[in-house]
Image (spheres, rainbow, N blue to C red):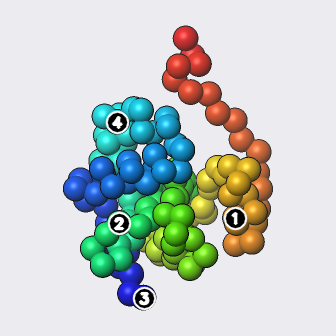
């Protein structure tokens, strides 16, 4: 199994939206143009390819000094359990080695991050629509 981690390219977006849809991340899928712009303006954004097909991605934001905030990590379901998520997190951190990594997790993913020795912290969220 030879996989390739590389930077996101605009041509990857539709495949990423397909992965989001398969995962049930309807907020990202339904806001197609806003999500596309978010990918274009985020850094780092990494994808994992296998035989030319995108099978995973990570989208993050960073100040390059203190914090690397991981917005999404998604590995296609049939590729889970092969360490791909861990490789994406390590590669993102390698790009900004002095930063801490912060992220939110779902109830389904919190066990994975605990196993990777991330410690929980408390946060809040309010969507743009909820401000109205």
Mark 3 or mark 1, earlier in chain: 3
Say which element carries label 1: helix
Mark 3 or mark 2, earlier in chain: 3
Q: Which residue is mark 4?
A: 32
C-alpha span from label 4 to label 3: 32 Å
Mark 2 or mark 1, earlier in chain: 2
Residue 3 found in image quarter: bottom left
Residue 56, percent across and down? 44, 65
Depicted 126 relative to depicted 88: above or below: above
Residue 11, percent across and down? 22, 56
Mark 1 or mark 4, earlier in chain: 4
Q: Which residue is mark 2?
A: 54
Q: Are marks 2 and 1 in contact (CB under 8 Å)?
A: no
Question: How packed is label 3: few (under 14 Cα within 10 Å), some, or many (20 or more)?
Answer: few
Say which element carries label 4: helix
Q: Which residue is mark 3?
A: 1
Question: How packed is label 4: few (under 14 Cα within 10 Å), some, or many (20 or more)?
Answer: some
Depicted 6 relative to depicted 29: above or below: below
């Amino acid at each position: 199994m030879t996989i390739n981690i590389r930077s996101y390219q605009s041509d990857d977006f539709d495949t990423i939206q397909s992965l989001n849809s398969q995962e049930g991340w309807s907020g990202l899928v339904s806001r197609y143009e806003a999500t596309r712009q978010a990918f274009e303006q985020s850094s780092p954004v990494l994808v994992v390819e296998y035989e030319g097909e995108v099978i995973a991605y990570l989208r993050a934001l960073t100040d390059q000094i203190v914090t690397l905030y991981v917005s999404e990590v998604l590995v296609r379901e049939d590729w889970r359990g092969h360490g791909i998520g861990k490789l994406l997190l390590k590669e993102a951190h390698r790009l900004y080695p002095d930063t801490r990594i912060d992220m939110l997790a779902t109830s389904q993913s919190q066990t994975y991050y605990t196993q990777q020795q991330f410690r929980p912290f408390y946060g809040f969220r309010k969507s743009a629509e909820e401000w109205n």
